[in-house]
Amino acid sequence: MSSETSTPYTPAPPLPLEQENLGLNKPAIKILENEEVNGLDFFDLTEEKLERHGMKMGPATRLVKFAKECREKKLRSFFSYKTKKELGEVLRKYGIDSNEITKIPPFEPEPVEIDDEDEELEQCITEIK
């Protein structure tokens, strides 16, 4: 489930759930939409709550299991690994066969052409000054 745009006031979009191969059908997704389940609510789902609102046991079980897996996943920066072995395993996962963070290629942004005559750009620069 994507949390890019989910806020306490914005229901989470159903499309990413379908893409996760959870096998959710339209009625199951409709229940999430009707109950306005957002990104934060998603992690507190229980099978009982979902079934109480009419979701069948199969989709409820899969959805709760998926929410638990998402909750347990931790995103860590390369700098937070405590041992060289831990770091080496993660770097190899990303195609870097070394234990040194200095071997991580730097991010190189692509240059973008900017029209100097753009009125909106001029207004932004004026406001920044």
Image: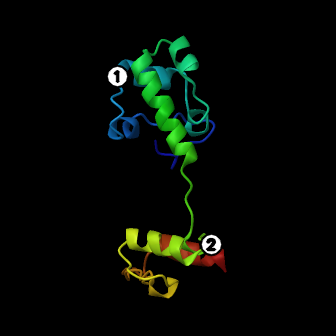
Q: Position of residue 112 (x, y in %)?
A: 37, 79
| Residue 12 makes an appearance in the image | no
Residue at image point 33% right, 40% down? 19
When the figure is inspected, residue 123 is found, relative to residue 23, above or below; the finding is below
**Relative to 27, is 12 on the left or the right?**
right
Give neighbour class at mark 2: few <14, some 14-19, many 20+ (Cα, 10 Å): few
Classify mark 1: helix, strand or loop.
helix
- Residue 109 sits in quarter: bottom left
Marking on residue 82: 2
When the figure is inspected, residue 53 is found, relative to residue 109, above or below; the finding is above
- Residue 75 sits in quarter: bottom right
When the figure is inspected, residue 103 is found, relative to residue 128, above or below; the finding is below
Quadrant the C terminus occupies:
bottom right
Q: Position of residue 124 (x, y in %)?
A: 57, 72
> Closer to the camera: disc 2 or disc 1?
2
Q: Amino acid at mark 2?
A: Lys
Q: Nearer the viewer, residue 90 or 8?
A: 90
Q: Who comes first in sequence, dot 2 or dot 1?
A: 1
Classify mark 2: helix, strand or loop.
loop
Residue at image point 47% right, 37% down? 66
Q: Position of residue 44 (x, y in %)?
A: 62, 32
Q: Amino acid at mark 1?
A: Lys
Total numbered labels: 2
Query: How far is disc 2 from disc 1 in space, using C-alphas?
Result: 45 Å
Q: Residue at the front extreme? A: 85
| Residue 1 makes an appearance in the image | yes
**Relative to 17, is 7 on the left or the right?**
right
Q: Nearer the viewer, residue 5 or 40?
A: 40
Q: Position of residue 76 (x, y in %)?
A: 57, 64
Q: Nearer the viewer, residue 67 or 93?
A: 93
Q: Residue at the bottom extreme? A: 102
Would you name the residue on which mark 1 appears? 26
